[in-house]
Amino acid sequence: MASDNTKDKSKSPWNDPYADPYISIENITKKFGDFTAVDNVSLKIYKNELFCLLGGSGCGKSTLLRMLAGFENPTSGRILLDGQDMAGIYPYDRPVNMMFQSYALFPHMTIEKNVAFGLHQDGMHKGEIRKRVADMLELVKLEDFAKRKPHQLSGGQRQRVALARSLIKQPKLLLLDEPLGALDKKLRENTQFELMNLQEELGITFVVVTHDQEEAMTLSSRIGIMDSGKIVQVGTPNEIYEYPGTRYVADFIGSINLFDGNVVEDEADHVRIQSEDTDATLYIDHGVAVTEGSRVGVAVRPEKMKLTRNRPDQADNVAEGIIDEVAYMGNLSVYRVRLKSGKIVKATLPNLDRDTEQFDWDEQVYVSWKPKSGLVLLS
Amino acid sequence: MRAGYLPLGKRLTSVLEPFANSVVGRFVVSIFGALGITGRTGVISIPFFWLGIFFLIPFAFVLKISLSESILAIPPYSDLIEWGEEGLISLHLNFGNFLFLLEDDLYWFSYVNSAKIALISTFFCLLIGYPMAYGIARASPANRNILLMLIILPFWTSFLLRVYAWIGLLKNNGLFNNILMGLGIIDEPIVMMQTDFAVYLGIIYSYLPFMILPLYANLEKLDGTLLEAASDLGCKPIKAFFVVTLPLSIPGIVAGSMLVFIPAVGEFVIPALLGGPDTLMIGRVLWDEFFNNRDWPLASAVAIAMLLFLVVPIMFFQYFQNKQSEAS
């Protein structure tokens, strides 16, 4: 897959065939009765990664996380953590800690006691515990709240307590179940960066489960997209966004305009597609190696679309339409354009200047894009 | 909550709505409104009224009798207020009954013994009831309802009958002794009736549901992810029970213990039917004073003293509940 960030590529262990994975999930299947929650998933996660499992509700991401924590036992397959097979190892014996979606703070204990809980279980010396807890509370900026009970804190503070509690044992692997789900948008953005800094500082491998694609894009080194118990695609946020492998992924991450059509010309360096949605043919600058006449989809991201009042000087990748809907978002304007074929496409245009020209309702426009903007989707 | 199931308050509103909108309803509402009684105060005043009529007034009677003197008459106590000549009203308050309670060891001993029996019974109810409540709370929803039903089922039979049934089981030629002798384990019957043992058994048996139900209500609410979190942090299940489940179920333990302890202190039927003559409990003493000695003033004083004796744990219970509701 052509990725232009060659700088990252050299240090990324997932591109190095000789790198040892830190967590190796091998053909894991989990069935609840007749229902298959996780279906033959294999995944390699490397040390110090912040790996996101992303998917809609019921896709099996949380079940996979619970199997890593040891709360569920896989029906078949195995999980290796740092070379050790996790089968038959109880949650309380695993070098893995979890931050729960509900935070699961002990309501009858102070913040200090909550954070110290894990260390107490290991029978650590009292003075050492006190020191470590104090350091940890300082790290998450809660040193003034040590003696409070969880119900006396705000949602954001509770989230940080939960994080502190799960980090204090310095686990080999930290699992985070929708870590920012309960926070409001502003707080979530700040916390995302705090979480990333913390992960870099501590050098702990994170596996995050989320349904929020923006969160996954911001946080992760790599994303694994799940659907109906299967991993559909694994890649860096950039790869997932720019080179989605399937319609499902393309549609799940960001928004997408999909044109269906038949391949009329397929060469090594380009492909031409005749679509019933547009008058002009669709021209993409990469070959797909399928037989001519096959039915494929062409995906174009809204921000890669251009809107003009006059027909642009290009034979391909252009369509005529009228503006159906306008949404001014401030940083950008979103237009829904009804093409002559009746298909509605979405285009987002950045408002680069204060007086960036806006299009009006029912205005006749041309939608166009470059050959390298589109992507052919075979499935 | 199941679909179509409305909370009681909502159901009541939906039932009362047609009435409130009718002519009669509007008339009633307007009269109450003119008296300054709005919907809220109206609703609250009903239980207050109930308590006033059926608790405070009888209590005032008992208090009055406890301050009078025992005489041979019908009713067998003197009037507190005497109407004399020329509008002279004299008030006779006799605190002798209360002083007598302090003088005679019997009363003090009965109070202490009642408290002791109630306390030990409460402890055993907790010991037996906690695992049961825990088991029910952890059962699958279908089994849970069946198990709860089994706990409540004995209430469908009269309390008195159930205590009588124990006589049939415990007496010398009762079921237990017959079985043990039939199996050749014992040669002669074990005396169980009219012992403290029988009284404990009766109280624990009778009050066990009052321990289980509040405990169940508490344990059922326990968030399972807290136990997962404990396990995740390296805590083994048995220890997790003592550091997470048990401390969080203290409100249920307190509620259940109060519901067992308070009625058990004043229990009369069980010691009367199952206990021996030396099982002194304040409920029986009160009965004897009232019906055998016909000393109504002294019996009333015993009742008042018992009330004061019980107010302390009730106040503790209230205080604890308030603290709990503040915390959550």
Image: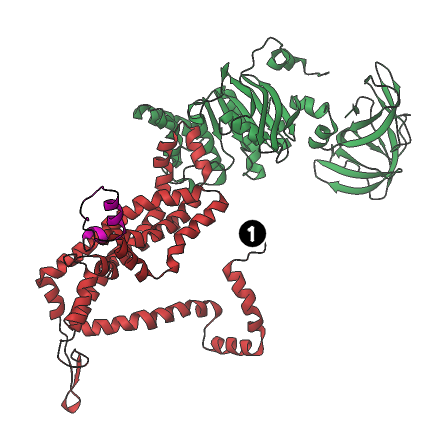
Q: Residue at x 58, y 38 (%)?
A: A185
Find the magenta span and give its range: B172-198
Is residue B31 positioned above or below A325 on the image? below
Q: Which residue is mark 1?
A: B2
From the top left corner, tell me how far across and down residue A50 is, in percent.
56, 23
From the top left corner, tell me how far across and down residue A195 is, in percent.
52, 28
Which of A68 and A191 lies nearest the eye of the viewer?
A68
Which of A272 and A348 lies nearest the eye of the viewer?
A272
- Hey, which quadrant is residue A192 in on the image? top right
Relative placement, left or right, of A324 versus A204 is: right
- Please, what secondary structure does the residue beneath circle 1 have? loop
Number of numbered tags placed on the structure image? 1
The answer for which chain carries disc 1 is B
Is residue B71 positioned above or below A25 on the image? below
Q: Is residue A198 among what the camera can see?
A: no
- Furthest residue to the bottom? B86
Q: Is residue B243 among what the camera can see?
A: yes
Is residue A210 positioned above or below B198 on the image? above
Q: Among the chains, which one is green?
A: A
- Furthest residue to the top? A18
Which of A10 and B153 lies nearest the eye of the viewer?
B153
- Hey, which quadrant is residue B43 in on the image? bottom left
Q: Among the chains, which one is red?
A: B
Q: Residue at x 89, y 32 (%)?
A: A276
Is residue B169 positioned above or below A342 on the image? below
Q: Is residue A355 magenta?
A: no
Relative placement, left or right, of A356 versus B302 is: right
